[in-house]
Amino acid sequence: MNLNKNQKIAVENTARYLCVLAGPGTGKTLTITAKIVHLLNEGINPSEIAALTFTQKAAVEMRQRVINSLNRKENLPFIGTFHLLCLRLLREFLPERQRRFQLCTRNTQREIISAICGKASDKFIEKITKFKNTGLSLDEKTRAIYEKYEEKKTEFNFLDFDDLLLKTLQLINKRKIPPFFSFIIVDEFQDINKLQYEIVKGLLKKDGSLAVFGDPDQAIYSFRGSEIELFLNLPEDFKDLTLINLSMNYRSQANIVHASNSFITSNTKRFAKKIEPVRGKSSFITLIEVKDEYEEAKTILKEIKSRLGATDFTELYENKEETQYSFSNFAVLTRTNNQFKIIKETLTEAGIPVKTMQKDTGIWIASIVKKLTEFLSREDISKKFFADISLHRFLESSGIFDGLSDTEAFILKNIAKTYKKGKLIEQIQLFIDEISGLMPMDMFPENINAVSLLTLHSAKGLEFSVVFIAGFNEGVIPHSFSSDTDIEEERRLFYVGMTRAMDDLILIYTKSRFINGKRMSLSVSSFLKEIPEEYIKIKKVTKYKPMQKGLF
């Protein structure tokens, strides 16, 4: 693998406790993959290694890279999510009856809560999840629903995804699950919560080594229970911690790298780090003032068309050799989902295809699980289920993918391709467990040629040639229409948005906006003052009084 100096140091470092600061575009996944391969080449038993991720998508990509590097699917370490690891441990270490539990997916959670209180509210599920992961107290109404929810789960021997973590930690603390691994690697460590952190420490052998990769400046999931302090306190937890900084950004042109570097230094909860661009300077970050949401959508459309060199969908394909961009090179990022409607309508009416994050993966995954379970529960089960057969080949020939979208089939095939040959029945059971944990972010259709419409939260981990951040207004970014705004997390969230851009970053703010049923006059985001003027170009498209002074 072609590694730079600091990546190579991170891969070959033998420190017992290693923290790799991996900022945006610095080759984190490449470095983790290289470290796994390095350990295997050094003769470490694969069963002694675990690489933990927060999304199935990241795990599948990492697993495939390791397979490609080693040119084999056999004798691989565990590479997967926290939830998948815990699920497999519980299948092995829970008492006999309990280990035959069924996963309580989001869809099933909604059905149970709907039966209890007459409506399937995701707010109750989110409160219960936060309670299980952080121990924060529940209000009286939610407590009553929670107790009935737990009774119903026990009745049907269900475990939800939070239970996987809780029960695993309980068994670790009772010494029912021993320390398993000599080497644990954690990806995106800034997203970790207390439960997951304790599980990591509990599964690490006494003289084992821990390597964590991540970036506190990209910690944006506190609403899920993640705690940035767990990352920042690593030097206190491990006095002999070795810190390595991946300092070369391969993604973004220099103006974007320098501007985002400067911007994030306004935060205090962080590790100081230096990131240098590999690419040179090209365009400035563009700030555009528009009248309202409709003008904002029209401006985005105009900017996309100007880069495509086409006026409609047909023209793009007739002239596709004349432009460096296709639809999938563009992304529109917003702070909230409800900002998409007008933008989506405007682009669609102009013949430009768009794609968004699925809100729910539960229904179609449940249908796949049902089909596979029916295969396994038939009385006339074929001998082939006990033979060594390729899971991917079986799924292709069984009709499992029929009726799925291209994206759904694509992700399932990618997961199946990483399975080695073995008893088909065992592979199917493992596959069911793995796909049951798929989340909306795992299912984003990157392979479809369309403009991406994403919230800043859901854009993390992705990159695009041209990024629009819409609604760059005070109150929207940073989002301060609620009483519990964490300004440092809002700043980290905007930093994530800035660093998705490879070539062009375009910030758009409206003079007025419809918020909570009212049209409100809004100013440009206060974050503008934290971006050095030397990296910004102002562009005015409105016909009324221009903005010139007082913006910075």
Image (spheres, rainbow, N blue to C red):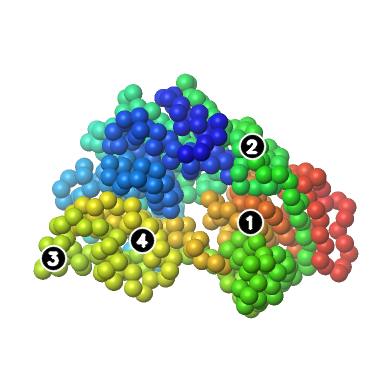
The residue carrying mark 2 is: 275
Residue 413 shows which numbered tag?
A: 4
Q: Callout 1: few (<14), some (14-19), or many (20+) C-alpha neighbours within 10 Å?
A: some
Q: Secondary structure at mark 4?
A: helix
Residue situated furthest top in the rendering:
240
Say whether disc 3 or disc 1 marks the residue closer to the N-terminus: 3
Say whether disc 3 or disc 4 marks the residue closer to the N-terminus: 3
- The image quadrant of residue 254 is top right
Q: Callout 4: few (<14), some (14-19), or many (20+) C-alpha neighbours within 10 Å?
A: some
Say whether disc 4 or disc 1 marks the residue closer to the N-terminus: 4
Identify the residue at horizontal 27%, vertical 45% (top origin).
74
The residue carrying mark 3 is: 382
Q: Give how far across and how far down residue 435 sits, in percent.
A: 34, 58
Q: CA distance from mark 2 to mark 3?
A: 57 Å
Residue 372 shows which numbered tag?
A: none
Q: Secondary structure at mark 2?
A: loop
Q: Are marks 1 and 2 in contact (CB under 8 Å)?
A: no
Circle 2: residue type = Ile
